Amino acid sequence: MKLTKIKGIVIKETSYKDNDKIITILSDELGKVSVIAKGAKKTNSPNLASSQYLVYSEFILYKSTNYYYINSSEVINMFYNLRVDFEKLQVAFELTKLIYSVTDENQDTSQILKLFLNTLYVIDKLNKDEKVVTAVFKIKLFDILGFAPRLDICNHCRKKLYENTEEKVFYDYINNTFFCRECVLNSQKKQCIEISVPTLIAINYVVRADIKKVFSFELKEKYDFELFGQVFTESISNSI
């Protein structure tokens, strides 16, 4: 019997038979993978904790026919503070729904796993605005997936967008591009949101930053940033 060792976090769990579960793990080696956790609903199961939603563990798996099964497991992080705070848990639930919808079986999700774990740590341990944290996660997630727009120049006139921090720029969420004020036609404004240049600089930081440092910035104008994160995510999600 071939054994496979992975590290991963449970992003979905479903009851299966009387005492078993089917859990979906976002992993470092197998991507998003469905695993049967036999006996995991029993109170004396050695896999009780590791098969719970949002628990990060090391798993030893074996494969039989079409499914992986847990041979053994060891919990690494349960994100306890997050689990006992309903509002934080709701944020995490939103993020796992998004991850589940944009990832496939056998896809390389190692970077997404790192981002998600870092995000959960920030929610769990640090006193940061959860709406900003959510926006950062969404922007970086779709950057990892290859959907980040060109941020430095106007898509029409090629003018640099960072030169005047007092100006506004326009994000065309239909075409996933940015325009300067001079180049936005009246007809295009209907499919654009207006954001400040400092917000654009913050977005650029998130896209370029290492995953470990992606939350290491301060932002005064939070509304524009949160709005971009929401609109950007929805427009890309609807196109894939």
Image (tube, rainbow, N blue to C red):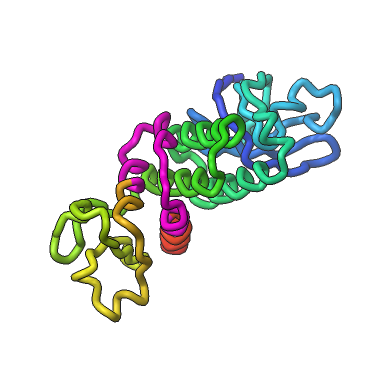
Q: Eyeballing the image, is 192 above or below 121?
A: below
For image coordinates 16% across by 54% down, the residue present is 160
Position of the N terminus, as image quadrant, is top right
Residue 147 in the image: state x and y as whole percent: 35, 52
On the image, which quarter does residue 141 sit in?
Answer: top left
Q: Nearer the viewer, residue 67 or 158?
A: 158
At 27% from the left and 57% from the top, the residue drawn is 166
Left or right of 28, for residue 208: left
Q: Is residue 168 left or right of residue 229?
A: left
Of residue 19 and residue 220, the one placed in the foreground of this image is 220
> Which portion, as a residue range, is magenta?
202-228
Residue 59 seen in render:
no
**Residue 189 lies in what quarter of the image?**
bottom left
Q: Relative to 3, say whether 41 is above or below.
A: below
Q: Residue at x 56, y 21 (%)?
A: 5
Indicate the quadrant containing the C terminus: top left, top right, bottom left or bottom right.
bottom left
Count of all numbered marks drawn on residues in the image: 0
The magenta stretch spans residue 108: no
- Give the residue drawn at x 68%, y 19%: 72
Q: Does residue 7 sit above or below 26 in this rendering?
A: above
Query: Residue 94 location in percent, x, y?
Result: 60, 50
Closer to us: 157 or 200: 200
- The image quarter in which residue 188 lies: bottom left
In the visual, does 54 lie left or right of 219?
right
Q: Is residue 130 visible?
A: yes
**Residue 173: horizontal and vertical position, in percent?**
37, 65
| Dominant secondary structure of the residues highlighted in magenta in the image | helix
